[in-house]
Amino acid sequence: MRSFVISLFTTAQILITQSRMIARILILLIALLTLPAWGIDCLVLRNKWPRWGRLLFALPHLLLLMALTFTAINESYTMTADAVKGFLLSATLCLVVPETLTVLLLLIGRIGKKQKFFRRSMTVLASLVGALSFMMMLYSFTLGYKRIQTKQFTFTHPSIPPQFKGYRIALISDLHLGTLRHHQDVVQQIVDSINVQQPDLIIFVGDLVNYHVREIEPFRNILSQLKARDGMVSVMGNHDYLTYFRWNNTAERLAAVRQLQQEERNMGWKLLLNENLILHRGNDSIAVIGLENHGNRPSFPRRAKLQQARKNLSPNCFQLLLQHDPSYWEAQILPNTDIPLMLSGHTHAMQLQIGKWSPAAWFYPQWSGLYQQGNQALLVNPGVGEVLLPFRFGAWPEIDIITLDSPLAH
């Protein structure tokens, strides 16, 4: 009886939590899909368009709101549901972002009510910004996530042995294969772009999937084509622990995680789970240390065991650390170690970057590119895939090529 009451109480708590979450999501969706559209109707359409025209303008907003409400209430964690959510959210953003910017500029124009030139100028500007932002969103959803670029970095450090001067490492992260499930051509382009660089080593720093190990199936043969002299090394990202899928029990999830890990090994990848790998060139060697994910929030897995991963390493050996989450650098590496270089991903640069700014900077001090402090450095890869939404603008999918340079070899 006692266990039944506890079970009933736990179920009730889960339902209440889910209900609150759905309510918050619905309130946000209603606000996003109604307020900007209502603003345009009041400021532009009401006195100029016939009623049927205004209803036609409102129709896509109403349909999207109904579809999103149904999806939120009937939340499902299947890959099909993920695809539907991605499409609906993409369509919503294509409407909401241009409309919001348009309304804001129109309201600014209303401030100068008596200044006709200013008001007309702001109206023209609002129209241009609305049209340009719509085209930007459309480009980001249709082509932006396919615009793969390669960046070159050189890292010099006194502990890099002479035989590793010119050693080239290809770094990628965050494939999120579930989002690219219908785009094998994009993954093939990523693989070809890496192979053409002829790197000595390829490193993947986590988030192979979104929710489920099944996402790997269409891409096994493509990802098995990755070639480097010293092979392919990988670590786990927060999504790779499959905690975002609704499993029947923990044992089922853990079995799926083990299957995912085996999938990587079957593709010829060397998966490091708080382990190290020694690479040799002649009489010289360097160590690649692979940590499990260790996030900066309790909802992210925290499984890194740095001391275990560095076991039996010579203190004079150049150490290259792999950790999915870049926040680990400031939290653990800088204050506690002298590890020269850490490679990370995770941030995606929020899949949006304008100039040198990205909203990712609100959450991560180090969100893309190379950061240095003294003799230690962190390189954050903004990812080659996308989570949930196939969207990128400015923060294009990126392959990083790191060339090691040894001052001792000069």
Image (cartoon, helix red, strand yellow):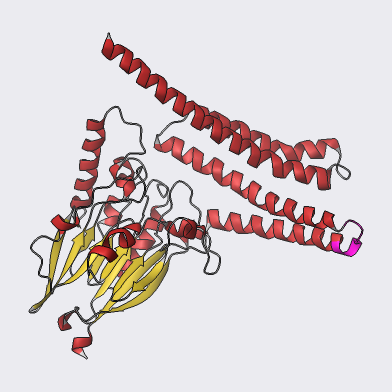
Q: Residue at x 71, y 45 (%)?
A: 36
Q: Is residue 4 left or right of residue 382?
A: left
Q: Quadrant of the C terminus?
A: bottom left
Compared with residue 109, is residue 10 higher up or lower down, i.e. above or below? above
Instruction: Single out the residue that lies furthest toward the bottom.
Output: 410
The x and y percentages for residue 328 are 31, 58
Q: How many marks?
A: 0
| Residue 48 visible in the displayed image | yes
Q: Quadrant of the N terminus?
A: top left
Identify which residue, 143 or 235, lies in the foreground.
235
The x and y percentages for residue 195 are 29, 68
Q: Is residue 90 left or right of residue 325?
A: right
* Extent of the magenta region: 113-118
Compared with residue 208, is residue 80 higher up or lower down, i.e. above or below? above
Identify which residue, 72 or 336, lies in the foreground.
336
The x and y percentages for residue 168 are 26, 75
**Hey, which quadrant is residue 222 in on the image?**
bottom left
**Hey, which quadrant is residue 275 in on the image?**
bottom left
Q: Is residue 261 left or right of residue 131?
A: left
Q: Residue at x 60, y 34 (%)?
A: 27
Q: Is residue 124 left or right of residue 196?
A: right
Identify which residue, 203 or 56, lies in the foreground.
203
| Residue 197 visible in the displayed image | no
Q: Residue at x 19, y 78 (%)?
A: 159
The x and y percentages for residue 266 are 18, 51
Q: Residue at x 46, y 41 (%)?
A: 83
- Does the magenta segment cover residue 404? no
Identify which residue, 59 or 36, lies in the foreground.
36
**Hey, which quadrant is residue 280 in on the image?**
bottom left
